[in-house]
Image (tube, rainbow, N blue to C red):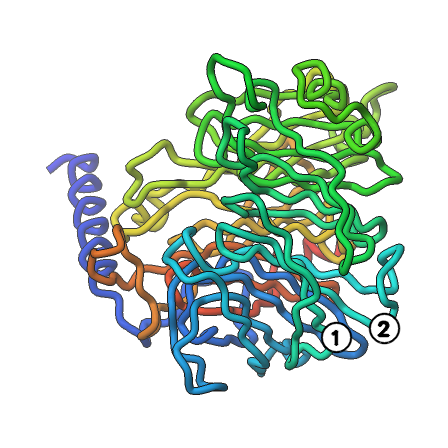
């Protein structure tokens, strides 16, 4: 038999074996990893997890983890509680300690729970209580809440904001108190847009304005632009906010002048909605924009001798894979040069070949979802961590954003809690679905699982650790 035919037979058998194994993964099979090692884990009571926020409180490190809707038994209370927010002490990453669970809205998936978490110290908020620590979280689909988590084991509600729907991925500026809430507002033509609120005094929120893409506002006709997924602000000094619209396709990256957004005319006319915009990139319908993470002022090694353009402003745009078993266009990581803000341009991408692990055959979603969002210098502009659903988390060397490269990965092992469902009434399947990722200032990486596998705390080893030291 010709060599090519032999190789084809071998590859088919290999993939078939992977598929059979993937359909019957059992606890104890062990994680898959390269240059990333497991330090500690917590099952998060078997709850489907979305956003982790890791916050230093005095001499402790606390993880606040938002959950999708569902219900599970809380061993601390002995009661079945609607999924909400897990609070975990991760001061010792090898032995995370579950402190408290704040129940969320009844419901399943994105129809309940309390998916989003952001945390600010009262001493940094202009009008906060300097002795307090505050948690901002979405409450299912119907409200936003601020909690006093000064004692993370005994949180108390400070205020609740209502009058909207479809809460999702917020951003909160701790130095100014401005919060960019991703919600649906009655009358607007989109499921999710931005409500800008002054939360500098968390007990007394002040509405600043509602904002969206031109064509989403009340009273207009024509095509409706894609819904917002999430903003990331560089703060008052940098005066830029980066918005990602269309997480699974028809993606849009929008760059806003922060001062014009906050201080400009508020009536939602086409002219007023365009007023703060300084740049916009409409992606192909095949590509989404779930996360837009800014990386300004990056020196490009190849361009170092150039008289102009040796330092570039970059935005990393991550799309979200929306369908199981590769049933939708595979989402990936795009690097966008925004040095000339009015003319953003995609310059490179990172895409994990599904054949490298027969990921389409494993079940569940395969493709990118989100990046870490920490500006801590331990990894910022050096390494990016991308949650990749059934391919776990991938560590990318981004020193040269024109040539990003993978230097490590970690895929947790399934547990008895792992339950991925193609539909609400479908049977459970043992498939990892690494959902979101974050890091802390100590250099630990935190991943959480959509399929109930829990929290995993990782450290870098080998080449990935060396990249972080550059």
Dot 2 falls on a residue whose secondary structure is loop
Dot 1 falls on a residue whose secondary structure is loop
Image: 334 above or below 422: above
- Asked whether 137 or 359 is in front, the reply is 137
Q: Which mark identifies residue 150?
A: 1
Q: Earlier in the sequence, mark 1 or mark 2?
A: 2
Q: Which mark identifies residue 102?
A: none
1 and 2 marks in contact (CB < 8 Å): yes
Q: CA distance from mark 1 to mark 2?
A: 8 Å
Residue 289 point in image, percent of width and height = 54, 34
- Asked whether 383 or 51 is in front, the reply is 51
Q: Residue at x 48, y 12 (%)?
A: 222
Task: Judge the density around disc 1: few (<14), some (14-19), many (≥20) Cα neighbours within 10 Å.
Answer: some
Q: Which residue position is annotated with label 2?
A: 131
Q: Residue at x 68, y 53 (%)?
A: 467
Q: Residue at x 18, y 57 (%)?
A: 20
Left or right: 287 as drawn, with respect to 416: right
Q: Quadrant of residue 232?
A: top right
């Amino acid at each position: 038999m010709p060599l090519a035919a032999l190789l084809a037979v071998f590859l088919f058998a290999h993939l078939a074996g992977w598929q059979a194994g993937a359909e019957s993964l059992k606890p104890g099979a062990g994680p898959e990893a390269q240059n990333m090692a497991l330090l500690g884990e917590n099952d998060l009571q078997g709850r489907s997890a979305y956003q982790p926020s890791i916050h230093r409180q005095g001499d402790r490190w606390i993880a606040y983890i938002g959950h999708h809707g569902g219900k599970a038994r809380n061993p601390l209370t002995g009661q079945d509680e609607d999924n909400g927010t897990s609070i975990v002490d991760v001061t010792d990453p090898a032995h995370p300690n579950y402190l408290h669970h704040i129940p969320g809205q009844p419901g399943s998936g994105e129809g309940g729970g309390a998916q989003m978490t952001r945390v600010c110290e009262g001493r940094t908020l202009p009008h906060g209580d300097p002795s307090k620590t505050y948690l901002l979280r979405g409450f299912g689909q119907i409200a936003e809440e601020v909690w006093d988590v000064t004692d993370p084991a005994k949180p108390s509600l400070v205020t609740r904001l209502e009058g909207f729907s479809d809460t999702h991925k917020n951003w909160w500026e701790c130095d100014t108190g401005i919060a960019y809430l991703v919600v649906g507002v009655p009358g607007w033509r989109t499921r999710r847009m931005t409500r800008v609120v002054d939360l500098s005094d968390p007990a007394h929120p002040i509405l600043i304005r509602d904002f969206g893409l031109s064509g989403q506002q009340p009273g207009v006709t024509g095509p409706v632009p894609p819904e917002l997924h999430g903003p990331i602000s560089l703060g008052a000094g940098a005066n830029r906010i980066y918005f990602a619209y269309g997480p699974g396709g028809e993606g849009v990256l929008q760059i806003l002048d922060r001062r014009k957004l906050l201080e400009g005319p508020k009536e939602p006319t086409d002219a007023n909605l365009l007023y703060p915009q300084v740049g916009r990139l409409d992606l192909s319908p095949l590509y989404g924009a779930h996360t837009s993470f800014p990386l300004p002022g990056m020196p490009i090694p190849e361009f170092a001798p150039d008289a102009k353009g040796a330092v570039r402003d970059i935005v990393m745009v991550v799309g979200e894979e929306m369908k199981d078993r590769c049933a939708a266009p595979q989402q990936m990581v795009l690097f966008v040069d925004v040095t000339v803000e009015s003319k953003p341009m995609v310059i490179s991408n990172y895409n994990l070949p599904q054949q490298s692990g027969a990921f389409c055959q494993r079940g569940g979603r395969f493709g990118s979802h989100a990046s870490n969002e920490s500006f801590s210098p331990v990894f910022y502009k050096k390494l990016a961590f991308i949650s990749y659903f059934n391919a776990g988390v991938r560590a990318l060397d981004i020193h040269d954003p024109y040539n990003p490269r993978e230097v490590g990965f970690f895929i947790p092992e399934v547990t008895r809690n792992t339950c991925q469902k193609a539909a609400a009434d479908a049977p459970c399947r043992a498939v990892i679905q690494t959902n979101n990722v974050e890091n802390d200032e100590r250099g630990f990486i935190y991943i959480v699982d959509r399929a109930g596998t829990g929290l995993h705390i990782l450290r870098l080893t080998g080449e990935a650790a060396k990249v972080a030291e550059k």
